[in-house]
Amino acid sequence: MNIWQKLILIWLGLLVVPLARADVYKCVDDDGHVTYTNTKPSAKAKCSALSRDQRVSTVPGRAATPSPSGFPKVDGDTQKARDSDRRKILEQELATEQKSLDQAKKELAEQEAIRTGDERNYQQVLGRLQPYKDKVALHERNIEALKKEIGNLR
């Protein structure tokens, strides 16, 4: 295929692009549910054509569903007690995680002070220290997550 044939195909392809547009209709049923469609609705349907300039989202919205009638309800005092217990548990976990972080930092410092004769290059030292650094980073991330969770409590 020569260059002229390719150019003609591209030109024909560009001519077809404007033909791919379709009309979009917004339909509202008796319950108030909104539906967007590209098929021409019947005359009795409550539909209106949208302007071609408007953008239409194709992502369905989340419908709020009411709780079932048998769903258990909790009174305010019970919920406050549960929230208080949750806060205490999170604060205990935070204190435990802080102690673990201090211990991990201490172990890392001890390992950084050790120099063995079989580690001929610095990469071997880094390889030996990496698990200790990972442990410190893990505890730091856990502490950050616990603080965020405590901050989100009411």
Image (cartoon, rainbow, N blue to C red):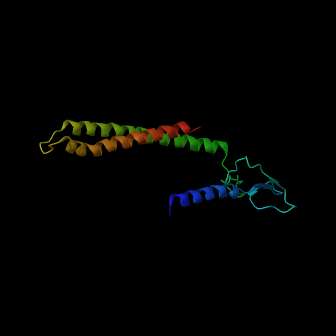
Residue at point 70%, 48% (across, down): 55
The front one of 96 and 1 is: 1
* Residue, far left: 117
Residue at point 67%, 54% (across, down): 58
The front one of 61 and 38 is: 38
The quadrant the C terminus occupies is top right
The front one of 19 and 79 is: 19
Is 119 above or below relative to 29?
above
- Looking at the image, how many numbered discs can be counted on the residues? 0
* Residue, far right: 44
Relative to 45, 13 lies left or right: left
Residue at point 74%, 59% (across, down): 38
The front one of 82 and 64 is: 64
Relative to 42, 91 lies left or right: left
Q: Position of residue 124 (x, y in %)?
A: 20, 45
Residue at point 63%, 58% (across, down): 12
Q: Is residue 33 visible?
A: no
Q: Is residue 83 visible?
A: yes
Q: Position of residue 125 (x, y in %)?
A: 21, 42
Q: Position of residue 133 (x, y in %)?
A: 31, 41
Q: Position of residue 71 (x, y in %)?
A: 68, 56
In which quadrant of the rendered view does residue 108 lie? top left
